[in-house]
């Protein structure tokens, strides 16, 4: 071989995640692609005077993680907003202190935005209300999204700007929570009711600054490819500017927001009108398809479940649209060579998604081979899984929720229903591809928390839910790599370490194949390589060049 490598990683344990899983200890890279996988002895002769050579000191090297469902721009925005996430604000009182501190830096009338509160983890074990926020921010409109993004709380000033009063009626697919005694809005807005509040948009420069910070975090987590499940004009603008300025350090796979929902206008008609097909773009940024919203979240008690939530007076969640109204849009997308992705968490929403895909398959033979996706699928049952297989569905499984969120699932669903969330043994049994994800910033984007949940089925509170649905470490690693590549028709260039694949790789603090599963969640990424270039290296790592 006469090639001179740009980068050589040697003296390691290479977890290729290829089917044969042949042992290797070195990888060589040139022009952003892997040119050699094998022994250190065979790799080192590819060194030239400008080759970067990294001694892995025996550490594990594996493919970069593919985050199959995320909201990167929301991650970037979170760096610009009040952080209400668990661990930062653990009570309503602490949220109020954070909002008050932000208000002290802004002129009266300027908006205060925030995200991340989780009532199940607040010390008060309740949702914050407008009256809580009014105590410390009467002169600033305040809008704070729950961690799931499907529920928000607005203060009185924000409700006034949005024209929300006790006489306001619910939008289809949304609910304004009102006090049972006074009839006044509590400030809690569920699903599409959030659209009533005209929150301001960030400037292009602010979004760029936020995304640069988000990309730094993605690299620390070892994420090298992200499926953006809410992409629209703003997202495309930010990604293209990052690419133009050579600031892109993640591959973005775009699912364009189809219909007007949750403050988003929707672009389905424009995309179809322009004749854009799935796959349009390049190895850095490309269009995967269009995304539809069917229901809400379990934590917010808005996912469309089959049986009512516990202690909820019969609440069974929210379906955004009637099946008859939604189906024509989905079928139109499929007939226009656009793959579809449908957010469906509760059983009723999953039923709706499958019914629509069955109708699409009757009208367009290509529907079954398009790898259309259903997102989250938290409460899929075995019959659903059989239908997934028949329809060629790829499940965007939000397994990152198992560890941080499933204790709350037990609280609102009961243990029996919570036992069967994210049923990966069923997916394996019926050969359904189900890439894992975190839906970041809904929960931490650290893939090892999702991998830990997939293997152990343990929650943060120590419960074991559906132990029979646990899978092996290898299968869990594949859920965050090669399965994610399959979900974008890119298994030939991403998701494993093989000659001629794109050079996205990570070095780990511990080898996940050789440690106690309990330690999986504690593994750290020590180096990230994106497109053949090192984008992150941990300060105290033993590896060096």
Image (cartoon, rainbow, N blue to C red):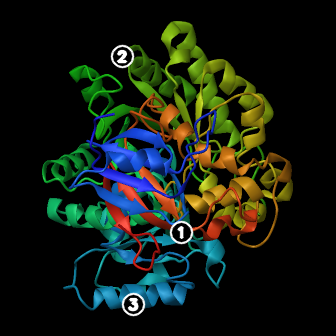
- Local crowd size for mark 2, using a 10 Å CA cut-off: few (<14), some (14–19), many (≥20): some
**Side of 449 where 41 appears, left or right:** left
- Asked whether disc 2 touches disc 3, contact meaning CB atoms under 8 Å apart, the reply is no
Q: Toward the viewer: 416 or 207?
A: 207
* Number of the front mark, 1 or 2: 1
- Asked whether disc 3 touches disc 1, contact meaning CB atoms under 8 Å apart, the reply is no
Instruction: Give residue 143's position: percent from left, percent from top.
Output: 38, 70
Helix, strand or loop for disc 3: loop
Helix, strand or loop for disc 2: loop
Disc 2 designates what residue? 336
Q: CA distance from mark 3 to mark 1?
A: 39 Å
Question: In the rendering, which numbered label is found on residue 524?
Answer: 1
Q: CA distance from mark 2 to mark 3?
A: 51 Å
Q: CA distance from mark 1 to mark 2?
A: 43 Å
- Local crowd size for mark 3, using a 10 Å CA cut-off: few (<14), some (14–19), many (≥20): some
Which residue is located at x 55 percent, y 68 percent? 509
Q: Toward the viewer: 50 or 307?
A: 50
Q: Quadrant of residue 291?
A: top left
Which residue is located at x 71 percent, y 60 percent? 514
Q: Is residue 444 above or below residue 137?
A: above
Q: How many marks?
A: 3
Quadrant (top left/top right/bottom left/bottom right) for the N terminus: top left
Disc 3 designates what residue? 136
Quadrant (top left/top right/bottom left/bottom right) for the C terminus: bottom left
**Side of 205 where 188 appears, left or right:** right
Q: Earlier in the sequence, mark 3 or mark 1?
A: 3
Which residue is located at x 28 percent, y 61 percent? 211
* Number of the front mark, 2 or 3: 2
Helix, strand or loop for disc 1: loop
Which residue is located at x 42 percent, y 57 percent? 194
Instruction: Give residue 91's position: percent from left, percent from top.
Output: 57, 85
Q: Earlier in the sequence, mark 2 or mark 3?
A: 3
């Amino acid at each position: 071989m006469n090639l001179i490598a740009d980068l050589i990683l040697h003296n390691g344990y290479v977890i290729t995640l290829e089917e044969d899983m042949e042992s290797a200890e070195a990888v060589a890279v040139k022009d952003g692609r892997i040119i050699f996988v094998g022994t250190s002895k065979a790799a080192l002769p590819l060194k030239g005077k400008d080759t970067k050579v990294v001694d892995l000191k025996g550490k594990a090297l594996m493919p970069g993680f593919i985050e199959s469902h995320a909201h990167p721009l929301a991650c970037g925005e979170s760096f610009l907003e009040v952080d209400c996430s668990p661990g930062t604000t653990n009570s309503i009182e602490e949220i109020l202190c954070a909002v008050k501190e932000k208000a002290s830096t802004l002129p009266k009338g300027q908006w205060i935005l925030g995200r991340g509160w989780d009532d199940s983890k607040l010390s008060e074990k309740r949702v914050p209300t407008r009256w809580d926020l009014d105590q410390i921010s009467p002169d600033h409109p305040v809008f704070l999204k729950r961690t799931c993004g499907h529920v928000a709380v607005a203060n009185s000033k924000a409700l006034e700007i949005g024209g929300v009063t006790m006489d306001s009626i619910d939008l289809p697919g949304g609910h304004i929570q009102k006090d049972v005694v006074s009839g006044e809005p509590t400030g809690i807005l569920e699903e599409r009711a959030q659209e009533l509040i005209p929150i301001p948009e960030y400037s292009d420069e602010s979004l760029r600054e936020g995304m640069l910070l988000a990309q730094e975090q993605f690299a620390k987590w070892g994420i090298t490819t992200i499926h953006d499940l809410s992409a629209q004009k703003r997202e495309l603008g930010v990604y293209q500017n990052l690419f133009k300025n050579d600031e892109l350090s993640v591959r973005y796979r775009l699912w364009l927001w189809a219909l007007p929902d949750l403050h988003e206008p929707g672009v389905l008609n424009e995309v179809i009108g322009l004749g854009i097909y799935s796959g349009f773009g390049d190895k850095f940024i490309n269009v995967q398809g269009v995304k539809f919203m069917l229901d809400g979240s379990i934590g917010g008690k808005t996912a469309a479940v089959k049986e009512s939530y516990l202690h909820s007076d019969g609440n069974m969640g929210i379906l955004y649209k009637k099946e008859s109204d939604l189906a024509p849009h989905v079928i139109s997308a499929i007939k226009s060579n656009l793959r579809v992705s449908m957010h469906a968490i509760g059983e009723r929403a999953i039923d709706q998604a499958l019914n629509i895909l069955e109708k699409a398959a009757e009208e367009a033979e290509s529907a079954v081979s398009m790898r259309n996706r259903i997102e989250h699928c938290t409460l899929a049952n075995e019959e659903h899984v059989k239908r997934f297989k028949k329809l060629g569905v790829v499940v965007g499984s939000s397994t990152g929720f198992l560890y941080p969120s499933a204790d709350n699932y037990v609280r609102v669903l009961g243990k029996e229903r919570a036992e069967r969330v994210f049923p990966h043994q069923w997916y394996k049994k019926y050969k359904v591809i189900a890439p894992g994800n975190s839906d970041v910033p809904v929960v931490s984007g650290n893939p090892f928390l999702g991998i830990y949940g997939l293997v152990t089925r343990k929650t943060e509170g120590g419960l074991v839910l559906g132990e029979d649905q646990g899978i092996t470490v290898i299968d869990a690693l594949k859920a965050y790599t090669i399965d994610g590549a399959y979900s974008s028709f890119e298994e030939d260039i991403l998701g494993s370490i093989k000659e001629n694949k794109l050079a996205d790789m990570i070095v780990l603090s511990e080898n996940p194949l050789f440690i106690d599963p309990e330690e999986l969640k504690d593994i750290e990424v020590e180096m990230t390589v994106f497109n053949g270039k090192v984008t992150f290296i941990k300060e105290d790592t033993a590896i060096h060049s």
